[in-house]
Amino acid sequence: MAMRQNTKNAKGPDLKALGLKSPMEIIDLLALLKIDGEPIIKDDKQLLNPNTKTQAVMQYFEDKFNLKPQDLPYLASLIKHDLKHGKIGWRKR
Amino acid sequence: MVGQMLNPNTVAPKIEKAHSQLSAARGPHIELTSDYILSLIQTKIPQLTENRNSPYSGVEKRPYKPVLSAQAEVAKAEAPVIKPQKLDLHPTPPSAEDYEAGVKQLAQNLPTLLALLPKGELRDLVLQAKQENDLLAGATV
């Protein structure tokens, strides 16, 4: 049981319980953000490759907000929640 | 045309143009402020991560209370209170008269019981009891 607990912690939080479908959804959602008018992904080429996209998103939040990668699911979950409840909305370019 | 050499001077601007078009076609985005992100990081995320095993650890726990419809509430109020009866684990043995009456009743019911029972060990036992009963009845007569 203790071993099972450890493996669960190593895998990270339960995405389903956070209202997220997959790990990539976290990156896709955060990559769409524009914070203070500045897009998180500046180079369009990074959008085309999932690995570079993930790296760029993680780097941005670590540099700007000192947020560790393991906390990104929680941030994405809270943003998704606020989007669903209309607290924040989509904007067209 | 196939096999034609590409001129870098003509291709480069085209690539640049395609790139700008891709930027324009990025689609919708979510405009947020750093204050909003900071408020999430400082207040909401610690609530969620205080116990990483349970993502709902920050959620207020409420006791379960079933919600009944008005009709169900009335039915519940009007329902008779049934008290559980105590089981008599050590009943007093029947009197000799009661015992005899019970045996007679059973003997009378044996043909009905036989008709109902399927073939098997139990039916054989009942049949044997009936035959013995008939013999006894014949002897007494």
Image (spheres, coloured by chain):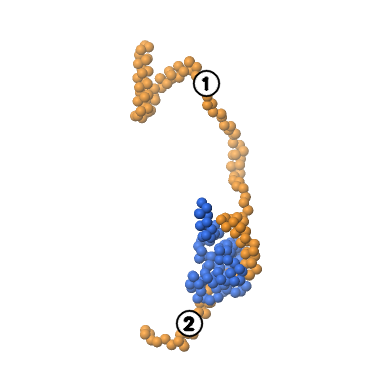
Chain colours: A blue, B orange
Pinpoint residue A58: horizontal percent, then vertical percent: 55, 69
Question: How far apart, in angstroms, are the residues tagged by discs 2 and 1?
Answer: 104 Å
In the rendered view of the protein, which quadrant contains the C terminus of chain A?
bottom right
Q: In terms of secondary structure, where does tag 2 sit?
A: helix
| Left or right, B14 with reference to A61 | left
| Count of numbered circles on the image | 2
Q: Earlier in the sequence, mark 2 or mark 1?
A: 2
Q: Residue at x 42, y 86 (%)?
A: B6
Q: Relative to B11, is B110 above or below?
A: above
- Residue B29 in view of the camera: no
Pinpoint residue B26: horizontal percent, then vertical percent: 53, 74
Q: Residue at x 51, y 60 (%)?
A: A11
Q: Residue at x 56, y 29 (%)?
A: B85
Amino acid marked by disc 1: Thr
Pinpoint residue B22: horizontal percent, then vertical percent: 51, 77
Q: Nearer the viewer, mark 2 or mark 1?
A: 1
- Residue B63 in view of the camera: yes
Q: Residue furthest front?
A: A3
Q: Quadrant of residue A31?
A: bottom right
Looking at the rendered structure, which numbered label has been put on residue B92?
Answer: 1
- Report crowding for label 2: few under 14, some 14 to 19, many 20 or more residues within 10 A (C-alpha): few
**Chain letter for the residue marked with disc 1 in the picture:** B
Q: Relative to B74, is B101 above or below?
A: above
Amino acid marked by disc 2: Ile
**Residue of label 2:** B15
